[in-house]
Amino acid sequence: MTTRSDSDVRQDAGELSTRDASAQTAPPEAASPETETAPPVPPSTHHPFAVQVSTWLLQYPRLRIAVYALASLIIGMTQGLGINLVSSNLPGIQGSLGISNVESYWLVAAYTATSVTGTILLYKIRTQFGFRRFGEYGLLFFAVASMAQTFTHDFQTALAVRAVMGFAMASLGPLALFYMFEIFPPAKKLTAGLCFGLAGSQISLPVSRIISPHLLDLGHWHQLTTLESGLSLICLAIIWILPLTHPPRVKVFERTDWISYPLIATAVACMSVVLTMGRYYWWQEKDWIGEVLVVGIIALTLSFMVELKRKNPIIDLRWLMTPEMLLFTGSMLFVRMLLSEQTTGMVGFLNLVGLLNDQLVTLFLVILAATFAGLVVVSIIHKANRIVYIHLFSIALIGTASLMDASSTVDTRPEQFYLTQGMIAFAGAIFLPTSLWLGFIRALQFGQSQIISFVLVFLSTQNVGAQVGSAFLGTIQILREKFHSAALVEHINLQNPLVVERIARYSHLLKPVLNDGNQLNAEGLAFLSQKVTQQAGLLAYNDVFMVVSYMSLGCFVVLCAHIWVGRIQTKKRAAAEVVA
């Protein structure tokens, strides 16, 4: 596989509309500045009604821009809400299904496992059938599954439906990007187009926390599935009415795919289950965790052996193993782990002090506003020579915010997180689009055929990175909680007058309902134990915030060193050229 010069790559970056975004209808030799930015002519292969709508929209350019932008936002939000609506409301869901707190996380594991496997298969589905067809059937299946879930009240059925939903929603991430690409001229597709194409998925987390209390008040967790079903039907109508231009379809599925894909799906599903459930059952306590991990490793090894010998693999491992892609994948996973401070750290901390979603609405409104602000700012300042500095700034924001959060106490409330969580949301909003642009440029070095593969790699790193970050930070929190609990209990002595006074104060609170002195004393001790456990958990979350701060500092130093080494190498090459 040969690479091309930087000038060729940047030219391709400006012309991404060909096939993958908004293909030009005029031949290259007849293209002019006016025809390059003109909207594409709707293809005749689509439904006649869709052609009529697209033709009508061409007469109103501003309306067309608004319609396609809204379509991208709705599709991106639908995918994001698919996972966030459930993960944000597990306490309410477990009550409705009659399951424990640990069992409720199986709903998250089922969705993420099938979502990643569906994303991996998207490249071949898109080439042979097109995103539109896969999106139509997938969303229709998702809508039926969502409506079926409305009538289910048992855990096993809900688990199966969540797995189906994860696979059906896999196509929505790329679709949201390509709908946004349709409204931008070639020069803006990889800058503003990328920034706003990711908007729907990025705002889905705060939106899910904001709307959840109102939905649960209307009718428990079934209102969440009703919303998902409605959004899927809206997305189905969007895909049907607003078709995307796609490249010629080519038959790419082979018999070997029936061997390779089940191995890949098994490996990804096993890894997802281990990463999601490991810290709740605890890594070394359950034998099945190790068994599932072994099965995943064996399946992954066998899939690699099969894929490396194929001419048209599902996953282009040789391309993924290039230094550029390894660096990109590693950095995306690492930063996604840092951003988990918001979901695993901050939300867990506030839940521990007794706050739920209905008391965090204003905080997530701040996060939503900061995310939008970041997307707007990065779409304006985005330039190739500024990307490394944008990344430095975003990592510095995450590190600073985490350091500030590390001083939280039992009296900390959402108001104290407004600034820090706004900083993290802003940092994520400016980091992800620029990283995606940089990855696009790297992918274009190997030709435009790698664009879709790269998009799928990016979406997969977001899912896997969130799982790894949650597992890593959650494990640290549990370990540090045990440490702090032991340290606090060690200093509690019933002979200490301060401890006796605190127990007496807790017992006094129960005197209106209890008369027995021994029972009052026992309840006071139990209340003190609860407070010690809570304090240990809060101290553990502060340690999590500090770990994220240290990781951000290390990433900042490494990135600075990378910039410095790159400049030295550039000067050496320039000096060598002068001498030559």
Image (cartoon, rainbow, N blue to C red):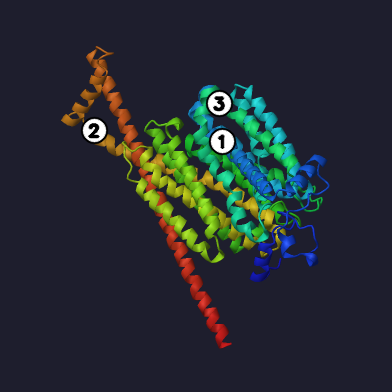
Is the residue 18 above or below the residue 114 in the image? below
Residue at 63 percent of width and 22 percent of height: 152
Q: Quadrant of the N terminus?
A: bottom right
Quarter of the figure with residue 444? bottom right
- Label 1 vs label 2, nearer the camera: 1
Farthest residue toward the bottom? Answer: 579
Is the residue 500 above or below the residue 262 in the image? above
Q: Tag 3: residue type?
A: Trp
Disc 2 and disc 3: Cα gap in Å?
42 Å
Q: Tag 1: residue type?
A: Val
- Judge the density around disc 1: few (<14), some (14-19), many (≥20) Cα neighbours within 10 Å: many
Residue 256 percent location from the top left of the image: 77, 48
Q: Earlier in the sequence, mark 1 or mark 2?
A: 1
Q: Nearer the viewer, residue 413 or 522?
A: 413
Residue position for label 2: 492
Residue at 51 percent of width and 28 percent of height: 214
Residue position for label 1: 108
Residue position for label 3: 221
Q: Nearer the viewer, residue 71 or 216?
A: 71
- Label 3 vs label 1, nearer the camera: 3
Disc 1 secondary structure class: helix
- Judge the density around disc 2: few (<14), some (14-19), many (≥20) Cα neighbours within 10 Å: some
- Look at the numbered discs 1 and 2 and tell me whether their residues touch, using CB distance below 8 Å: no
Disc 3 and disc 1: Cα gap in Å?
15 Å
Is the residue 362 above or below the residue 225 in the image? below
Q: Which of marks 2 and 3 is nearer the N terminus?
A: 3
- Look at the numbered discs 3 and 1 and tell me whether their residues touch, using CB distance below 8 Å: no
Residue at 58 percent of width and 37 percent of height: 81
